[in-house]
Image (spheres, rainbow, N blue to C red):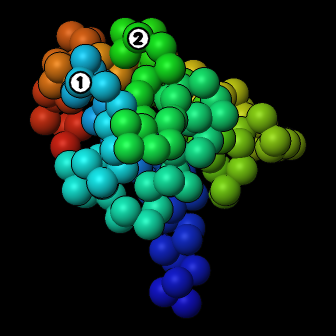
């Protein structure tokens, strides 16, 4: 019974899967070290506290999505495929196919409600649009510089933002 209750409580939460979190962190590291050539997985893994065995798999999707480039060999490693100012956090999440908001494990556009529950669908869509707006407004360059855009800083500075519902 406790497990079902936990699952019910998680239904309304925006969740960032571990793989998506790792992907963003893995993409930030070459941005921090930009100019020093490709960054080896052996450098990225400990710097971002990502298990090394997961790193290559995690970077496969951003590579296919045009976010990072990889080179094999002694002078190989990972580098950004575009300027860090041109890659948003949303771009990385899209590359790893992480839903920005899910309800009961589904993207809101895959849901249907009837009767008095009908207003829920536009509510979930609006929530996703708001989250997307934030993620599209933060670039990898912002993260690498440790300076989030002012609207994001302002939201994060609200005391209620740090409280769990």
Indicate the position of residue 12 as horizontal and vertical percent values: 53, 51
Kindly give the residue lying farthest to the bottom in the view shown. 1
Label 2 environment density (alpha carbons within 10 Å; few <14, some 14–19, many ≥20): some
Residue picked out by circle 2:
83
Q: CA distance from mark 1 to mark 2?
A: 14 Å
Q: Residue at 60%, 24% (x, y): give it.
A: 66
Q: Is residue 102 left or right of residue 162?
A: right
Give x and y (percent) for residue 20.
49, 46
Residue 4 visible? The answer is: yes
Quarter of the image with the N terminus in it: bottom right
103 and 36: which is toward the camera = 36
Most foreground residue, 109 or 25 = 25
Q: Which residue is at a point 15% across and 24% down the rendered structure image? A: 146
Residue at 52% of width from left, 77% of height from top?
5
Q: Residues within 10 Å of mark 1 (few under 14, many from 20)?
A: few
User: Between residues 55 and 95, which one lies in front from this camera angle?
Assistant: 55
Asked whether the beta carbons under mark 1 and mark 2 sit within 8 Å of each other, the answer is no
């Amino acid at each position: 019974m406790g497990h079902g209750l936990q699952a019910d409580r998680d239904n309304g939460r925006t969740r960032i899967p571990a793989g998506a979190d790792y992907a963003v962190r893995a993409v930030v590291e070459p941005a921090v070290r930009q100019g020093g050539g490709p960054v080896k997985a052996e450098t990225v893994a400990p710097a971002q506290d990502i298990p090394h065995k997961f790193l290559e798999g995690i970077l496969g999707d951003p590579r296919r999505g045009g976010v990072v480039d990889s080179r094999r060999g002694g002078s190989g490693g990972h580098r950004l495929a575009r300027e860090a100012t041109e890659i948003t956090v949303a771009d990385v999440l899209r590359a790893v196919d992480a839903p920005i908001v899910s309800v009961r494990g589904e993207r809101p556009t895959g849901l249907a409600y009837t009767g008095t529950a009908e207003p829920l669908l536009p509510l979930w869509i609006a929530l996703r649009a708001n989250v997307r707006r934030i993620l599209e407004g933060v670039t990898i360059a912002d993260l690498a510089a440790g300076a989030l855009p002012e609207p994001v800083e302002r939201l994060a500075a609200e005391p209620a933002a740090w409280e769990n519902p």
